[in-house]
Image: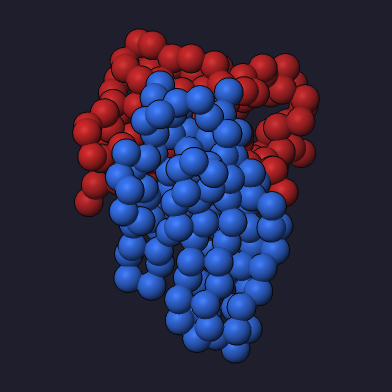
Chain colours: A red, B blue
Amino acid sequence: DGGITQSPKYLFRKEGQNVTLSCEQNLNHDAMYWYRQDPGQGLRLIYYSQIVNDFQKGDIAEGYSVSREKKESFPLTVTSAQKNPTAFYLCASSIFLAGAETQYFGPGTRLLVL
Amino acid sequence: AQTVTQSQPEMSVQEAETVTLSCTYDTSESDYYLFWYKQPPSRQMILVIRQEAYKQQNATENRFSVNFQKAAKSFSLKISDSQLGDAAMYFCAYRSDGNQFYFGTGTSLTVIP
């Protein structure tokens, strides 16, 4: 089955700890994105990547880092510098193809601080 | 940066009736895409419908249709014959020329049996 997978579904972080959220897609999509969703605030862009080994900051990149070593994978690390990481995190991908510019989403990861 | 505004935080509709969700956006681009996504309690984002700005014809997908007014920068979603399974958060989204997506804050739709 083609799609986007995110793991884990739930993640707990201790104070001062870095944690990494996984995002994998087998859709052969060029672009991948990370969003943060807080209640009443919709989706806010953290980072996005349009090709391998390249990525750009979104609106709320502080306290987060990413890598794009493979087309299929776009992991997000929540660092200890992110003081309020509790949120729902969504990964998405899209393809650069005329008539097919649509973003598809993974099932999400809920991050909670202990 | 582009902005997307959904002015209705909550809406309700009687089962089998029709409801319209509003969305406006701000942009200086001439070529772009607009989307409506549905997020049920499972929190999986599901594409409902999309519209290319260069197309004058409004998009339709079964019971879902849009009213796209390019000059007014308005993109409303109409749900006909509402069903209990339509209850969800609905997000309007804009895709820019640079392949960035911008989302509104969402409208929570309740369907009353």
User: Which x, y percent locates residue A10?
Assistant: 58, 46
Seen from this angle, which residue lies furthest bottom? B113
Residue pictured at 45% horizontal, 26% vertical: B29
Q: Quadrant of the C terminus of chain A?
A: top right
Q: Point out the residue furthest to the top here.
A: A53
Horizontal side of B40 relative to A99 (left or right) equals right
The quadrant in which residue A51 appears is top left
The reply to whether residue A16 is visible in this rendering is yes
**Relative vertical location of residue B35 with respect to residue B61 in this rendering, above or below:** above
Residue A92 location (% of width, % of height): 42, 37
Q: Is residue A112 above or below residue B99?
A: below
Q: Nearer the viewer, residue A32 or B7?
A: B7
Position of residue B109 in the picture relative to residue B29 (left or right): right
The residue sitting at 30% across, 45% down in the picture is B55
Residue placed most toward the observer, A66 or B97: B97
Please report the residue visible at 33 percent of the width from the left and 62 percent of the height from the top: B60
Relative image position of residue B6 (x, y in whole percent)? 64, 50
Residue located 47% across and 49% down the image: B69
Which quarter of the picture shows residue B58?
bottom left
Q: Nearer the viewer, residue A101 or A49?
A: A101
| Residue B4 pos. (x, y %) | 59, 40
